[in-house]
Image (spheres, grey):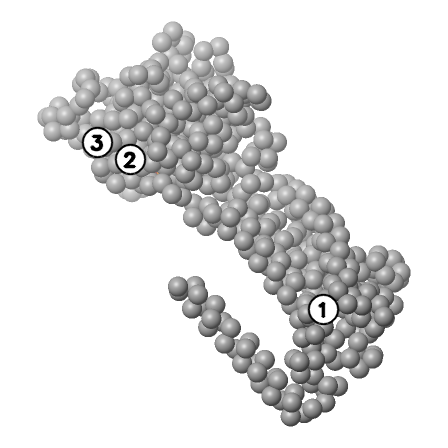
Amino acid sequence: MTGILPSDILRLTALSKSFLDGFHVCQALADVSFSVQKNEIVCLMGPSGCGKSTVLRIIAGLEAADSGTVQSGDCLNASCVHAAMIFQEHGLFPWLTVYDNIAYGLRLRVRSGKEGEIKETVTGLLALMHLEAFTGSLPHQLSGGMKQRVAIARALAIQPLILLMDEPFSGLDLFTRQELEDEILRIRNNYHTTFLFVTHNPEEAVYLADRIIVLSERPAVAREIIPVPFPHPRDTRDPGFIGIVRQITGRIRLKEEDVHQD
Amino acid sequence: MVIHHKILKGMVIPLGILVIWQIIAMHVNNSFILPGWNEILPFLLTPLAPLFGGPSLLENSLVSLERVLAGFLLAILIAIPLGLLCGWSDEVYTYINPFVQMIRPVPPIAWMPLAIAWFSIGFGSILFIIFIGSFFPVLISTLDGVRAIRVLWLDVAQTLGATPLEKFTTVIAPAAFPFIWTGLRVAFGIAWMCVVAAEMLPGTSSGLGYLIMYAYNLGQIQVIVAGMVVIGIIGILFDYLFRAGQSRLFTWQGKE
Ligand SMILES: Nc1ncnc2c1ncn2[C@@H]1O[C@H](COP(=O)(O)OP(=O)(O)OP(=O)(O)O)[C@@H](O)[C@H]1O
Ligand SMILES: [Mg+2]
């Protein structure tokens, strides 16, 4: 095992995880190891049900690994990794306004009398995500894309070390999705945020990622790490781009076919 | 305009019944069987006048209302925390739920003899009946509310740093609140029925239920009908207040 590199913001080592499903033990992760560096966008891909969400949930502290470690700086287990997570469904609190949703995490930390500081942060995030016009709206008054913008702002508000995103745009139409993908790149450039991003869409992965990690079918092992060497903004019609999309599609399909054969 | 039409259409049947009532009353011409509205209305229009040398219609209404509010508040104070606790901990739920399901089908008024034995006739026993009547709707709606909370909201709260107690105060409680409110509305309706029924039993000496029974003994059917009208009006009024609160407080409900 290599030690943690100075540029690594997160390092997973030999994670394994089984679920007890009735009387049946289902092993989701067998041996997942990879690292994410500061200011990097890493995409996590793999066949359906291979354990991508489980990896993110372990990092976020929502699930405990059976064995293996999650390292981040001096922190040696997931409970102290300062991560925020964006889910496929926005998960906004429907009873709070856009402003109060974004302020939610800040109010948990900054106990009282700091409403001025909170306001400054939230106002900045509203501007960043182009949400100023919706400050006082309730989530049900927003479109799907707007909701996911609020969810991103809410996660950024706690200044996480890494932003975990679990198929965040898969419920959106193509145009909104492309818009939000560009927002991710913009946030990464301006705020040096680090992303670990799960997606089913190879084009999305190649458009965003610095590296793409392909998990095997269940129980998952992370063997293949595919770097994407193109500078941003990327041209989706570039032959090199298309080549990597094909390569990834092939890898994932191959693994799914293996599963179907046995 | 549309709303206006709906209200007008809704008034057709009640007004029709009033007219038919009045026609039949004039034919029957016997106020022990069917008093005309010309005999009933004077009581409704002078709610402050003493009745049968005792308290007025308004005073009797206030007594009933006071009893309902006391029993209702007592029930809320116990049922909501208990419901939240049950929804929060499966362990507590497992212990409490079968008991709740066993007691729930017993009509509140069937408790009256026991209530009298335990608390004697009067305020104590009536309070107990109202408590029983409103406790279960509030408890059950609180349970439903807590069980309907989406795990996703709790996961989001946790990733943003909420402690278990903060998850309770910032997610579970606000998410369950609309359900609890519906329970309050149902419970108030039941409590209002319970108070009138309990006051009709022998031994009470005030309240709308008492007034109705007393008027019955004196053969004053006009007063009985006037009392029934007041019971109906108060019931509708509170139901309206609860519904107005609902549309104002929970615009988000059912639209996530
Ligand atoms: N709480 C749980 N209880 C039982 N089994 C679970 C649980 N969570 C996940 N699993 C199982 O673990 C495996 C991996 O699940 P996971 O959700 O991580 O996959 P995924 O790669 O995110 O899938 P998808 O592409 O469909 O989002 C699946 O077989 C799933 O059924
Ligand atoms: Mg998943």
Other-residue count near label 1 (Cα within 10 Å), few / some / many at <14 / 14–19 / ≥20: few
Parent chain of label 1: B
> Residue at the location (30% across, 32% down)?
A199
Q: Residue furthest top?
A: A6
- Counting from the top left corner in percent of width and height, residue A41 is at 30, 21
Q: Give the label on residue A157, or none.
A: none
Work out which residue is located at the far bottom of the displayed protein and give it: B27
Q: CA distance from mark 1 to mark 3?
A: 79 Å
Q: Position of residue B219 (x, y in %)?
A: 80, 82
Q: Which residue has dot 2 on it?
A: A200
Please tell me if label 2 and label 3 are on a single chain.
yes
Residue corresponding to mark 1: B46
Q: How far apart are the two marked residues, 2 and 3, measured between alpha carbons?
A: 9 Å
| Residue on which the image places disc 3 | A203
Question: What secondary structure is marked by label 1?
Answer: loop
What residue appears at the point 35 percent right and 31 percent down from the top-left corner? A131
Can residue A202 be seen by looking at this rendering?
Answer: no
Queried on whether the Cβ of the residue with tag 2 lies below 8 angstroms from ligand 1, the answer reads yes
Q: Nearer the viewer, residue B250 or A167?
A: B250
> Left or right: where does residue A206 sit relative to residue B114?
left
Please tell me whether mark 1 or mark 3 is closer to you in this view: 1
Q: Quadrant of residue A232?
A: top left
- Percent of width and height locating residue B3: 43, 63
Could you tell me the amino acid type at mark 2?
His
Under mark 3, the amino acid is Glu
Helix, strand or loop under label 2: loop
The relative height of residue A146 versus residue A227 in the rendered view (above or below) is below
Q: Do the dots labelled 2 and 1 sit on one chain?
A: no
Q: Chain of mark 2?
A: A
Q: Is residue B168 above or below residue A9?
A: below
Of the pair A25 and B241, the residue shown nearer to us: B241
